[in-house]
Image (tube, grey):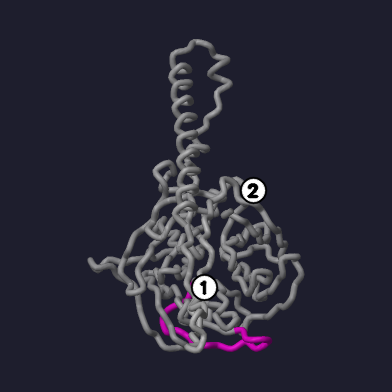
Amino acid sequence: MDTQHKAAIDRQEDAINHAILEITQAILDLKRLLDTSDVCLVSEYTSRNEESRNFPAQFHVTLPIFTPKEINREHVHQQIGSLSELAITFLLDEPRILTDTQTEYRGLLSVSCLSDNDLWTCGDNDNILRLYNLQGELLRFVQTLLGNWPRDIAVTRRGDLVYTDPRDRSINLVSGTNVKRLFRLLGWRPQGLCSTSSGDLLVIIETDDRKQTKVVRYSGSTEKQSIQWDDQGKPLYSSDRYTKYLSENRNLDICVADGGARAVVVVSAAGKLRFRYTVPPSTPQESFHPRGITTDSRANILTSESDNHRIHIIDQNGHFLRNIHYCGLQDPWGLCVDSRDNIFVAERYKGKVRKLQYYK
């Protein structure tokens, strides 16, 4: 393990040193351009700032997991368990497009993985929930209970589908071909939702006048937790026209894409504010309106920025890692990841789901 760790760190150090040399040379070239009177040299200049923003490449180490075995006392030399392999992965400089899946939606909002090959989808002004495979084949479709269009969808641990109906103020369950209402809210309308590792539902809800917003945890139809205020009694989330989406991280943090606040708001499982991610220093704050959000097995947080056609990757402590924006994404909205940390991106106006590999 030490040898593999050192080899990975050495490769990382070599890449960083190489990038530093290139940046140093670029600075010297720029200083010469400032002093030159040759217009041709200036006109031929091409900025390399965008290349530098994505360095250094990030790598992650997944430590081995010990799996114990039941011990038979009669066998003295029996193996007591096994260790999984040590895995070292790097964020790709340019993500690879693995599949493109065209849907029937004109305004594709949300995507949720039923499996690594099958995806539930929902769209704007459309009351049909559709299940596609990666080849674009429609496997199943279900009309919403009251014919209203859903705001968000999520697949539960049991493999059922849940969706929010703001007009009816309800959370609804699709199991097989049956659709039923789980519960309705009084005075509040649901927006985004997600299914947690414990089997609960986390739902973003807002008042009818949009003056209050909070995250509520439900076990079945029972409210277990309400998250609305920080330690100073100020609202954690904005109250405005922006639909908010959320996801539970591997460390049980609750991550909300709050477009109105121009931030990703992350609280602990107990509802205490951990951090607000806005944007890297190189990006104008006023242009950042996060839309969809998901998390991966490394506890990284991914959020889509439709206006600027990119996805931000940040770590579990709010540190910026990288943007995904070199693969022709158009209006990315809903996000989810599969068991191998490939990301599915819903392109809103194209009605297309793209599967991207961003680790190697």
User: With respect to residue 265, does 17 lie above or below?
Assistant: above
| Residue 67 place in picture, x, y as percent | 49, 76
Residue at point 55%, 72% (across, down): 152
Q: Residues within 10 Å of mark 1 (few under 14, many from 20)?
A: few
Residue 315 place in picture, x, y as percent: 43, 57
Position above or below: 41 against 336? above
Q: Is residue 99 above or below residue 21?
A: below
Above-or-below relation of 213 to 320 = below
Name the residue rendered at 50%, 39% in the picture. 15
Q: Earlier in the sequence, mark 2 or mark 1?
A: 1
The amino acid beneath tag 2 is Gly
Residue situated in front as seen by the camera: 313 or 304 = 313
- Tell me the kind of residue under disc 1: Ser
Numbered tag placed on residue 328 in the rendering: 2
Q: Give yes or no for contact between labels 2 and 1 (Cβ–Cβ under 8 Å).
A: no
Label annotation for residue 194:
none
Residue that lies at the very extreme toward the top in this rendered image = 37
Mark 2 Cα within 10 Å, few/some/many (few <14, many 20+)? few
SS under mark 1: strand
The x, y position of residue 92, in whole percent, is: 57, 49
The residue labelled by disc 1 is 82
- Magenta segment range? 174-191
Q: Is residue 169 visible?
A: no
Quarter of the rendering containing residue 178: bottom right
Horizontal arrangement in the rendering, residue 140 relative to residue 269 (left or right): right
**Which quadrant of the figure has residue 275?**
bottom left
Can residue 311 be seen at all in this image of the molecule?
yes
- As drawn, which residue projects farthest toward the left? 232
> Which residue corresponds to the image point at 50% horizontal and 81% vertical from the top-left?
69
Most foreground residue, 263 or 294 = 294
